[in-house]
Amino acid sequence: MSASTTSGTGRHADAAVREPVLEIKNLSVDYGFGQDPTHVLRQVSLTLNRGEVLGLAGESGCGKSTLAYAATRLLPPPGLITGGEVVLTDRSGERRDILTMSDAQLRASRWQDVAIVFQGAMNSLNPVFRIGRQIADAIAAHTPGIRKKQALDRAAELLDMVGISPDRLSAFPHQLSGGMRQRVMIAMALALEPQVLIMDEPTTALDVVMQRQIVEQIAELRERLGFSVVFITHDVSLLIEIADRIAIMYAGEIVEDAAAQDVYRRPRHPYSRGLLRSFPPLRGPRRELTGIAGSPPDLRLLPTGCTFTPRCGFSTPECSRIHPELGPTAFAGAEPDRRVACILHGDVGTLPPELAER
Amino acid sequence: MTADVTVLQDDPDDAPDESVDETAATKAGHRFLFLRNTKAMIGFGILVFFGILAVIGPFIAPYDPSAVSRDILQPPSAAHWLGTTHTGQDVLSQIIIGTRGVLVVGLIAGLGATVVGVLVGVTAGYLGGVGDEVLSGLSNIFLVIPQLPLIIIIAGQVPSAGGVTVALVIAATGWAWGARVLRAQTLSLRRRDFVEAARASGESTPRIIVAEILPNLTAIIAAGFVGTVIFAVLSQVTLAFIGVTPVSDWNWGTVLFWAQNQLALQRGAWWWFVPAGLCIALLGMGLTLINFGIDEFINPRLRSTGLHARSLRKRRIRPRIGFTPVVRTAETTPVHRPPAEEQPAEPRPAEQNAIEEIRR
């Protein structure tokens, strides 16, 4: 294995000791309870390892949030999970399928095992209660018998952790800025020391300075507390900064899954390459920004074969016939951890040089 | 009678949501989507039945409802399907003829109260300030006035209070609740961005109210209309029953008035008052079911689930927020999968070459 391919994988822990904490296997999701539902996720598989930051990227409507919410069973009606498994591995090594949990089990497991920071979560704070009480509420609900004083102390600790002075415990939500409120939500999500933190565009509504502060805070907390993060965003450049691994989604499927730096420097899927080409690099030679022509397909009327074919610059007649599976790249031996869904990787000889960068 | 349907046709909600429903539905099916709800269908069926009865009643009634005969206080028989009264009048004919009076009063009163309620409520909510204070004060006064005594007093004062007079009196006293609800909703709507944008781009106040705000209120107006019709029907029947309105105008309340007056219950003449009571209950149920239908229609979440409630139960799907149902179906197989031979599980020969290249 060449040194260059491992450069991005092991920013955090040793890449060799990979212990999966959340395994999504063949997850399928429909929207609509009627006769003709829309298949928005089709057999998606993804593994989140302990202590890892996994980025989910892709255009709007490609299923990033759907994947995260389906895996936690938070998808509102008319969402329907039609198949698959979501296996959560406890710290003790016990494995449980979230999709078969009863309501009570699910309620007990949420927040404790998997916590979510929603998109625009800062609006979820109740404006008439002090934030300290709101954080303490969540702690009290999951820790029977805890004293109010203890819960508030813990809330102060949490606020301190996300960089807010503990004396703001008695502040009302309207007295905090948007970024502070967002950090309060992150503190709340971490209140019960979950193993997995899902962040659905946690910084989209914030300015870049705040974005940076929050992202750095998450990275630091992750180092300290050792939880895993699923980070959903449109902002691929942000992901490259924060994520260990990136999964690129397109039309309800994962098309590429690789270490962040690998995706950035050597995209293997035409769609990943298009995404990366749609924002300018800070360093390096100037290049023309191309973007991706067209828009994502209507999930009700998916093209046969590869769903990206109509917008793909490298498509062959085969592409519109054969639906690619997520599998090893053309350089499977050299990069065993990478997966890509593109039939061009079936043959190194015909692989366009743009997708074969080393 | 179809007023509630026509109002709903213009609901902006019903066009873009087609994806939720079966493709089998026709365009007309989408247009009258709320009618595909079982509850609304039943309610609408009941209303249509009484509507037809009201129109053709005088032609199909077997006897003159006021005609006296020798068959005094007869139980139901082939000659008199619902029996006769103490003067030998045919109860069935009285009920059939009485339907028109009930429906006309109900609809006129409902329409009148809705119009007044919309005018007062929307204006008060949109204008704010002194206008709002005055109009809200007015509707608050009408809310605290005990309605039935007021109706009795007014109806008693008006000489020869016919159906239309009664309807107008009911409308004049029954608009305040609708106005209050509409005012509250308008207050919330006028602060929304699309209304502020319309104001900022210089649209006139009447246009904003008619084109921007009213379409958002159609569902509430329709539900309020149906509710007022129920209230009007019950009020009118009550007035007739206690004998405030002329007892010679046939409606279901008049039938009950005579039955009560002549001690039908004590004489065991159940056929005299039970049918009229059932008709009132049935009409009330029909209107209420329509109201439920409108409710489910205006809430898209309720709608998509309400439409398929039975089939969902059969498939053991219970749609709830926060607990996504999991149903492992046979049709999970994706839309398209490549042929089996196209899924290489083993590293391909080409890769082996590449690996060797790298090693070198």
Image: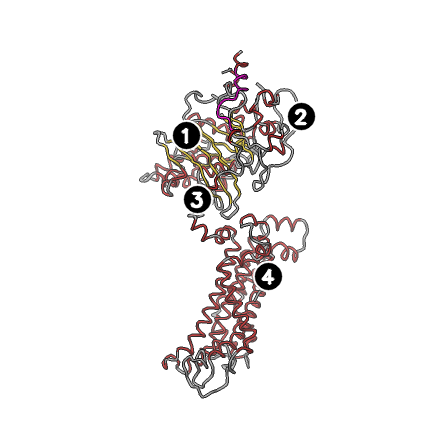
Q: Can residue A213 be seen in the rendering of this structure?
A: no
Mark 4 secondary-structure assignment: helix
Tell me where the magenta segment starts and ends, as one range.
B343-355
Residue holding disc 1: A21
* Marks 3 and 2 on same chain: no
Instruction: Give percent across and percent down for residue B22.
Output: 54, 50
Separation (CA) of disc 4 from disc 2: 56 Å
The label on residue A288 is 2
Amino acid of disc 3: Pro
In this rendering, the answer to whether B62 lies above or below B119 is below
Cβ atoms under marks 3 and 1 closer than 8 Å: no
In this rendering, the answer to whether A305 lies above or below A337 is below
Chain of the residue where label 2 is placed in the rendered structure: A
Mark 1 secondary-structure assignment: strand
Q: Nearer the viewer, residue B35 or A148?
A: B35
* Marks 3 and 1 on same chain: no
Residue holding disc 4: B6
Residue holding disc 3: B325
Cβ atoms under marks 4 and 2 closer than 8 Å: no
